[in-house]
Each structure stands twice: as C-alpha cells, then as structure tokens.
Image (tube, rainbow, N blue to C red):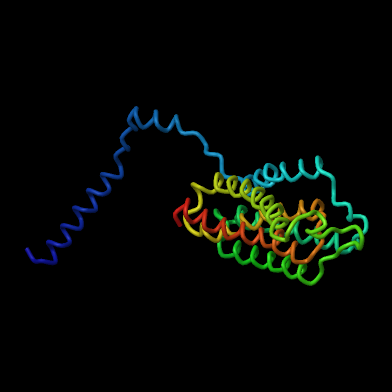
Amino acid sequence: MKPEDAEKLADGIDDRLSGAARALPPPPPSPEMLKAIAAVKPVRTRSRFGAFLTVLAIGAMWPAFTLIGSPLRKDLGGLPPAWVAIGTALWAVTLVVSLAVALVPARGDVLPSAGRASRVSATLMGLVLLFTAVWTASAPGVSLRPEDLGMTLIQSCYGCGKYVLQVAAIVMILGLLFLRRVLPVGGRRIGLAVGAAGGALGGLALHFLCPIGTTVHVLLSHVGAMVLASLAGALIFQGLLGR
C-alpha cells in the first residue's frame, strides 16, 4: 500500500471514530457532582462604596461627639467667614477624597488604585499646608496664644497633635479591617491616603475647637500631625499587609 493511501485510510478511520463518539450520549453526572452543584450559592459582590461609607461613619463618631460635647473656640465669631469656610472645605475635601481614593475602586475596577490614592492625598495635604502657611486668621483680643493658656508651644502642639493622631488611628484600623484580604499590592500608598484622611478628620474638628490661632501652632500640631498620620499609615499598612 502506498503511503498516500495509508494516510487517507487513517484519516477515514479517525473521522468515523470521531463521528461515532459525537453520536454517543454524554454520561450522566455523578450524585456527588449534583450534590455539589445544588449546594452552590450566589456570592455577594463587594460594594464599591460600602467600606468608604462605613469607615467614614464610624471614624467620624468621636470627632462629632467632641464637637457636640465640647465648647467651640471662643474666637469663632470674630474670624473672617471666608477663612472659616475655606479652611472647612479644605479639611473636609482632604478627608473625603483621600478616603474615597483609598477605598473606592474606579468604575469597572476591582481594587482602588494605589498610585492615584497617594498622589491625590499628597496633593490635598499640600493644599492644606499652603493655605495654613499663607493665611492663618485670628481675632485680636479673642484668639489665644500658647502662653495665654500657660503652655509652651511644644505643650500646645502635643495636645492637638495627640488628638489628631488618635482620630487618625481609628480610621486606619477600620481601613485595615476592610483591606487586609483584598489588597494584593500597594499597601504603603493606600495607607498613606487612609492616614491622611484620618488626620484631616482630626484637623477638621480642631478647626472649630482649638482656641490657639498662631500660624506655627496650626502648622505643627494640626497640619503636621496630619502629615505624620499619613506617614504612619504608609508604614503600618506596609508592615501589616506585607506589601
């Protein structure tokens, strides 16, 4: 038999075997497979805004309680309304946007963008720093200095800075709880944004509570503590998440 004839014969046999196999009915599934399929339940997908709203709501409880239960700064009525409004907006935007870019993935994405989170939060912190350095308002005769309270600058900064870091710690703990299993990479940059959001939350409360109106105090204890919280968040997230 010629090689060409043998090849044609083999192809014909293969075609007949394939056709016969396709004609056979598939074997029935095993009872174990049917049981496993019946036990399958739909998995609830992760809400894009669930973590953000939860962290924001729980994290804001202590500052809200502080604002309600403590007297507001006595010079608030004598401060320029524009300064109060702009400062409030900057602190609030830094809080909300930094937390959102750290916890809310973009539409169509599964995880938040670590690079975008760090860039946005760093930019917003820079704007708060610039605003504070250029324009720190005070009401003559009403706004206080550290020495008016019998404190040194360091002592006054310690009190306000401690409050900011404590508020930020709650936000960072909540953020870690939500991200510990879903964040494969970028923990350091996400942590920076979460820490910045927590620090901004504390700074927002102090904007209405702290009676000291000197530029150096606000820069060191309010803005400086926010920056310190962001750096702490970067280190903590990187260390605990391992990435």
- Quadrant where the image shows the N terminus: bottom left
Q: Quadrant of residue 233?
A: bottom right
Left or right placement of residue 23 versus residue 239 in this view: left
Q: Nearer the viewer, residue 225 or 234?
A: 225
Left or right placement of residue 153 versus residue 181 in this view: right
Can you give x and y, in whole percent of width and height, for residue 20 in the image?
26, 44
Left or right placement of residue 40 versus residue 205 in this view: left
Can you give x and y, in whole percent of width and height, for residue 44 in the image?
56, 39
User: Does residue 107 appear anywhere in the picture?
Assistant: no
Q: Residue at x 71, y 45 (%)?
A: 60
Can you give x and y, in whole percent of width and height, for residue 188 in the image?
52, 59
Q: Residue at x 54, y 49 (%)?
A: 179
Q: Residue at x 90, y 60 (%)?
A: 79
Can you give x and y, in whole percent of width and height, for residue 57 in the image?
70, 43
**Extreme residue toward the left, this view:** 1
Q: Nearer the viewer, residue 26 or 9?
A: 26
Q: Count of labels shown?
A: 0
- Quadrant where the image shows the C terminus: bottom left
Image height of 59 relative to 237, above or below: above
Q: Residue at x 13, y 63 (%)?
A: 5
**Extreme residue toward the front, this view:** 150
Q: Nearer the viewer, residue 232 or 57?
A: 232
Q: Quadrant of residue 204?
A: bottom right
Left or right placement of residue 102 versus residue 180 in this view: right
User: Does residue 26 appear anywhere in the picture?
Assistant: yes
